[in-house]
Image (tube, grey):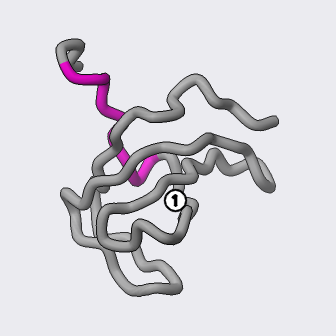
Amino acid sequence: MIDRRNTGKRCRALRLIDTIKGSMLPGSMGTISYQDVNLGRELVFASWDEYPEHKMPVLKEDVEILEKEGNRC
């Protein structure tokens, strides 16, 4: 089921993430579009700063979801 509670929040890669467009280094930043579960895995779909034209899914455990400005975690 699609979860939009974190839509618009920023996220940060915690480790190297390989994608079809290339690798994203730890610390890469993105903006969350939505989250979903596929085959029992929690995925975060985000527009990444390195590849803004593509919403790429990453495993939820590979990213840190940041609170909006002023509400830092």
Image quarter of the C terminus: top left
What kind of residue is marked 1? Val
Left or right placement of residue 13 versus residue 36 in this view? left
Label 1: few (<14), some (14–19) or many (≥20) C-alpha neighbours in 10 Å: some
Q: Residue furthest top?
A: 71
Q: Residue at x 21, y 22 (%)?
A: 69
Describe the element under mark 1 as helix, strand or loop.
strand
Residues in magenta, as a range: 61-69
- Residue 46's x, y, as percent? 49, 53
Q: Residue at x 53, y 55 (%)?
A: 59
- Residue 29's x, y, as percent? 27, 54
Q: Using the image as rendered, state which of residue 53 and residue 63 is in the foreground.
A: 53
Q: Residue at x 50, y 46 (%)?
A: 60
Q: Using the image as rendered, state which of residue 36 and residue 48 is in the foreground.
A: 48
Please give the residue where the numbered disc 1 appears in the rendered image. Answer: 58
- Residue 11's x, y, as percent? 34, 44
